[in-house]
Amino acid sequence: MLENFYLMLTGAWESFRASFYLNFIQDDRWHYIADGLAVTLQITLFAVLLGIVIGLVVGIIRTTYEKTHKLKILNLICGFYLTVIRGTPVVVQLLIMYFVIFGSSRIDKVPVAILAFGINSGAYVAEIFRSGIQSVDSGQMEAGRSLGFNYLQTMRYIILPQALKNVLPTLCNEFISLLKETSVSGYIAIQDLTKGGDIIRSRTYSAFMPLLAVALIYLVIVLILSKLISILERRLRKSER
């Protein structure tokens, strides 16, 4: 029985080695995974930065309208933007951005993806910032005005720093969500991490190994980011004491 078990393990190991060589070593196919990972991280990073800028602006406009009833036209535009972006799938937005908005121009696909994902992320970040600003005690605004600050100065020096501290963990979670959402970039023929695994599958006719590798890479990145977020949350809690 032990001999049969040993033979079974040996056979499984040899099968794993052969599959690994076929999918990653032969013809340097691992480059599809490595290059795809670099593209995925590039899209995610710049889309997050764009989303933060858009979200901050939209969040401030909507909060300003709620508090002062000013910027009515801008608030209506922001409300329309949030309704459309949050009410449609990100893959549809990506396709519209590439095939409709930039369909007649020869623009690189990666900036298009960054723009599409950044605009999508900005709609969710805007609500994160709005809730963060609302979580700051209203007395802080009154205290800033009593010190001689105008509305914008009070927002910049008093409200926003406290709001950012409150929403920082949630913003990091948005980064994780966006990382996974970029897996649909292949719809416009971007060779991201998921597309890299799919290219290997199409060459080797073996789906298990390349797709498992893609899933494990996403999982490892998410676990690392989740750990960093938990460390950040602990430090923020300590700073409040």
Image: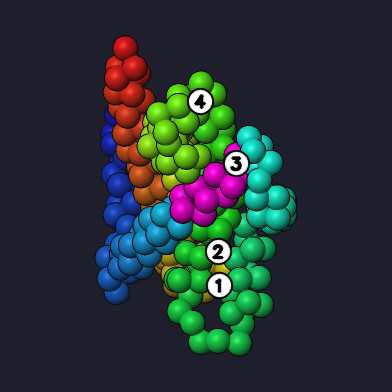
Look at label 3 and name its amino acid.
Thr
Label at residue 116? 2
Q: Residue 225: image x %, image y %?
A: 35, 39
Label 1 vs label 2: CA separation?
12 Å
Asked whether the residues under the numbered discs 2 and 3 touch, taking CB atoms below 8 Å apart as contact, a structural biologist would say: no
Instruction: Please provide percent x and percent y for residue 111.
Output: 45, 71
Above or below 150: residue 180:
below
Magenta part of the chain: 51-64
The percent coordinates of residue 49 (x first, y second) are 41, 54
- Image depth: mark 1 or mark 3 in front: 3
Residue marked by disc 3: 64
Labels 1 & 2 near each other (Cβ < 8 A): no
At mark 1, the secondary structure is helix
Q: How far apart are marks 4 and 3 (CA)?
A: 14 Å
Closest to the camera, between mark 1 and mark 4, is 4
Judging by the rendered image, the residue that carries numbered circle 1 is 188
Instruction: Give the residue at mark 4.
Output: 142
Q: How far apart are marks 1 and 3 (CA)?
A: 38 Å
